[in-house]
Image (spheres, rainbow, N blue to C red):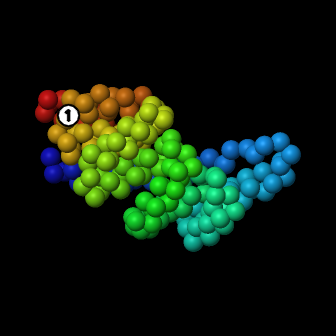
Amino acid sequence: MNWIRAYGIGLLTVLAISGCVTAPPAPEPEGQASNQAVLEASFREAVQAMAQGDLAEAQARFGQLAREYPERAGPMANLGIIAFREGETETAKRWFERVLAVNPRHVQALNHLGVIARNAGEFGDAEQYYREALAADQDYAPAILNLAFLLDIYLGKPAEAVELYERYQFAASEPHPRLEDWIFDAKNRI
């Protein structure tokens, strides 16, 4: 069980981070096409800097976008992801909460807040965040797997976890190679 817990903690962190760079902001109303093009170009440059590991540059670009477009969730979400990657949990939490003020159904922010809550031992809050993410997007693979781990490893509900592990198998583009082992282990504990 200890190897599962240790492996699960590491995987939760990786899953929370991987694939979470949000899409460009939604289009603006008609007549603002050039402003939208500038916004999208700036956003792409920030995403590219983040993908290349230049977190300081990405943070500066997303910060500028967040100041100029406070009604857009994308730049704030990415600032939260950067803070999370840097181990700045409280800063990340504040950014994700700001994202939810703009878009209460932002799956990446909900999933990250779930990971933050789980890491703090706030399992009820973590479960709520993961379930809210799945209510917004029932196929969001990171939240499916994070909820499965929470139920299986931390809340002792392997039967519920098995259903989620199997659901993750279909939702993930590339399910984790150890998934079958986790399902087998959880079924043995039912």
Residue at image position (56%, 58%) is 76
Left or right of 35 on screen, residue 59: left
Residue at image position (24%, 39%) is 151
Q: How many labels does the image show?
A: 1
Q: Position of residue 30 (x, y in %)?
A: 83, 42
Left or right of 10 on screen, residue 143: right
Front in this rendered view, residue 44 or 65: 65
Residue at image position (78%, 43%) is 29
Q: Is residue 29 visible?
A: yes
149 vs 160: above or below: below
Q: Can residue 172 be seen in this view?
A: no
Per the image, label 1 sits on a secondary structure element best described as: helix
Q: Position of residue 44 (x, y in %)?
A: 68, 55
62 vs 118: above or below: below
124 vs 88: above or below: above
Q: In which quarter of the image is residue 65?
A: bottom right
Image quadrant holding the C terminus, namely top left
Q: Position of residue 67 (x, y in %)?
A: 65, 64
Q: Where is residue 60 in the image (x, y as percent from the top left)?
A: 62, 70
Mark 1: few/some/many CA within 10 Å (<14, 14-19, 20+): many
Residue at image position (37%, 42%) is 130
Left or right of 179 on screen, residue 152: left
Q: Name the residue under label 1.
A: 158
Q: Which amino acid does label 1 sit on?
A: Pro
Front in this rendered view, residue 95 or 20: 95
